[in-house]
Image: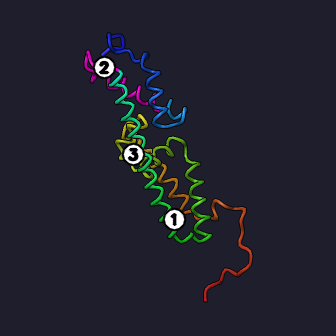
């Protein structure tokens, strides 16, 4: 369906869409975002618009469904955050050594070259498959696998080197090193 088709006047419906979106979300900025999302969806689905149908009703339906989708996403995210908060409240804080080591590992992750860091993040943190991550990055799967392998090897080397190899400005004060009893 072409936007120039008679009866498919999206521009003429913008004011009504904005009013409806504002009544749903009660915030002008969020309403504009909602209208934008609805128009993008309408553009993507313009082939489903039946010639002779009421474009206003069709667009209002898309806007309403976009709003419902946003509400569901927010509720889902809130449930995940609440679940994470419950776990965090029951978790025992890491020891200082462990906390320092995790900070060092995080810093090592951020020193990886950008392409390795992006590949490892998508696979290890976001849990995308190699194919999904390769598609997201627009690279062949083999290239992604190579980047992930190189990133993991660099982090493994860092982990095996221990904290003394990366933090040379710290030294142990006190004790003899023979703290075994």
Residue 7 x, y percent position in the rendering:
32, 13
Residue 173 x, y percent position in the rendering:
74, 74
**At numbered mark 3, what does the secondary structure look like: helix, strand or loop?**
helix
Instruction: Verify CB contact (< 8 Å) between mark 1 and mark 3.
Output: no
Position of the C terminus, as image quadrant, is: bottom right
**Label 1 neighbourhood size at 10 Å, few (<14), some (14-19), many (20+)?**
few
Question: Which-is-in-front pick, marks 1 and 3?
Answer: 3
Give me the residue at 42% from left, 43% from top.
Answer: 71
Q: Which label's residue is closer to the chain start, 1 or 3?
A: 3
**At numbered mark 2, what does the secondary structure look like: helix, strand or loop?**
loop
The CA span between labels 1 and 2 is 51 Å
Instruction: Using residue 73 as the reference point, say whether residue 108 is left or right of it.
Output: right
Q: Which label's residue is closer to the chain start, 3 or 2?
A: 2
Disc 1: which residue:
88
**Label 3 neighbourhood size at 10 Å, few (<14), some (14-19), many (20+)?**
few
Disc 3: which residue:
72
Residue 163 x, y percent position in the rendering:
61, 64
Residue 36 in sight here: no
Q: Main secondary structure of the magenta part?
A: helix
Q: Is residue 76 magenta?
A: no
Disc 2: which residue:
54
Above or below, 117 against 139 in this view is below
């Amino acid at each position: 369906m072409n936007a120039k088709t008679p009866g498919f006047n999206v521009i003429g419906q913008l004011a009504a869409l904005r009013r409806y979106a504002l009544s749903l979300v009660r915030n002008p900025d969020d309403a504009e975002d909602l209208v934008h999302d609805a128009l993008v969806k309408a553009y993507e689905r313009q082939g489903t618009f039946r010639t002779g149908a009421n474009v206003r009703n069709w667009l209002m339906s898309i806007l309403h469904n976009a709003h419902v989708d946003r509400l569901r996403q927010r509720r889902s995210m809130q449930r995940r955050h609440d679940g994470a908060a419950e776990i965090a409240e029951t978790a025992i804080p890491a020891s200082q050594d462990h906390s320092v080591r995790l900070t060092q590992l995080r810093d090592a992750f951020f020193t990886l070259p950008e392409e390795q860091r992006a590949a490892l993040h998508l696979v290890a943190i976001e849990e995308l498959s190699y194919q999904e991550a390769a598609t997201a990055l627009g690279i062949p799967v083999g290239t992604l696998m190579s980047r992930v392998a190189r990133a993991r090897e660099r982090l493994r080397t860092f982990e095996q080197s221990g904290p003394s190899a990366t933090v040379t400005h710290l030294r142990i004060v006190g004790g003899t090193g023979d703290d075994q009893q």
